[in-house]
Image (tube, grey):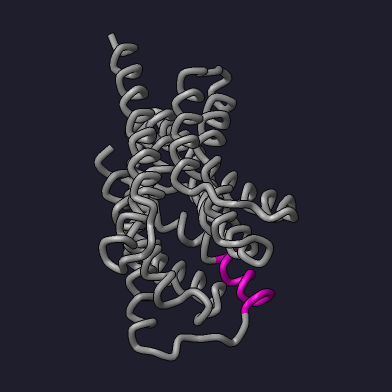
Amino acid sequence: MGYLVAVTLLWAFSFSLIGEYLAGQVDSYFAVLTRTLLATLVFVPFLRRRWLNLKLAVQLMLIGAVQLGVMYIFYYQSFLLLTVPEVLIFTIFTPIYITLYYDWLARRFSPYYLLTAVLSVIGAALIRYDNLTSDYLVGFLVVQGANICFATGQVAYKQLLAKQTTPPPHLAIFGCFHIGALLVSIISWLFFGKAHYPTQTMQWVILIWLGAGASGLGYFLWNKGATLVNAGALAIMNNALIPAGLLVNLLIWNRDTNLLKLFTGGSVILLSLYLNERYTRRRKP
């Protein structure tokens, strides 16, 4: 759980930096390409052939391509169809997809995990609810594409590592994950990218940090943490970023935030996490 909490805080700061210095100023596909390229350069030197075979390498690349590469394509396209509040509202369904996909792979159904995931969605909705425009169905579906990619990637990585007879060190194989994401990022930039590049030193510094820190270290720690917790906790932590991100914006940039909604929704998310952990401990012999 510690890995997931640490990455939640890391990403909360990172999203604020994107909103302040990059959004609307730097081409989003170029930003994604830069981030995945830097993350790949950080982790490729740690690849170890003794822990990799062709099948495992391809599986990791596919997971990275979906969880990070394709997810970003859906995510950035959604901002062309929706208002920002709508995008934020529609991302709260990720915990449900995680729970359902995990149970489908395991050929079982865990209603309690699904219940706590739904509870975390309710908590996130209390924080992020705003008025919706009348024409949002296509945008909703696009955001769900991003949610499904992110959810399936996490679960697939968790399951892939669990199936290994001798689980390899995460650091020795994770470069393949970023290689897969990089390939998708290159293709998306070639087809959709525009000539809007950073013009300020601060923007380059933030891109470097996002690439090596948020994308590189962040996804490594998040996916590693995903292998150490149950499906319910993983699902719930996907919505913990919403109150954390709002709190960072409030404390650093003094953005207008409804403190009552933040406290109420955050409390519901924490309650869902507590109930999930209590249920998991009671099931252990």
Q: Which residue is drawn at 29% across and 17% down?
A: 281
- Can I make out residue 58 in this image? no
Q: Which quarter shows the C terminus?
A: top left
Q: Residue at x 24, y 41 (%)?
A: 2
- Can I make out residue 125 in this image? yes
Asked if residue 113 lies left or right of residue 69, the reply is left
Q: Residue furthest bottom?
A: 199
Q: Is the magenta stretch mostly helix, strand or loop?
A: helix
Residue 233 percent coordinates (x, y): 38, 31
- Which segment did they paint magenta? 183-193
Q: Residue at x 54, y 73 (%)?
A: 28
Residue 269 vs 26, above or below: the answer is above
Q: Does the magenta stretch include residue 88?
A: no
Q: Is residue 186 magenta?
A: yes
Q: In which quarter of the image is residue 109?
A: top right
Residue 6 percent coordinates (x, y): 26, 49
- Depth check: give the residue in front, 152 or 243: 243
Asked if residue 220 lies left or right of residue 69, the reply is left
Q: Quadrant of residue 284?
A: top left
Residue 279 percent coordinates (x, y): 35, 17
Residue 65 percent coordinates (x, y): 56, 56
Q: Which residue lies furthest to the top in this view?
A: 285
Residue 280 vs 220, above or below: the answer is above
Q: Which quarter shows the N terminus?
A: top left
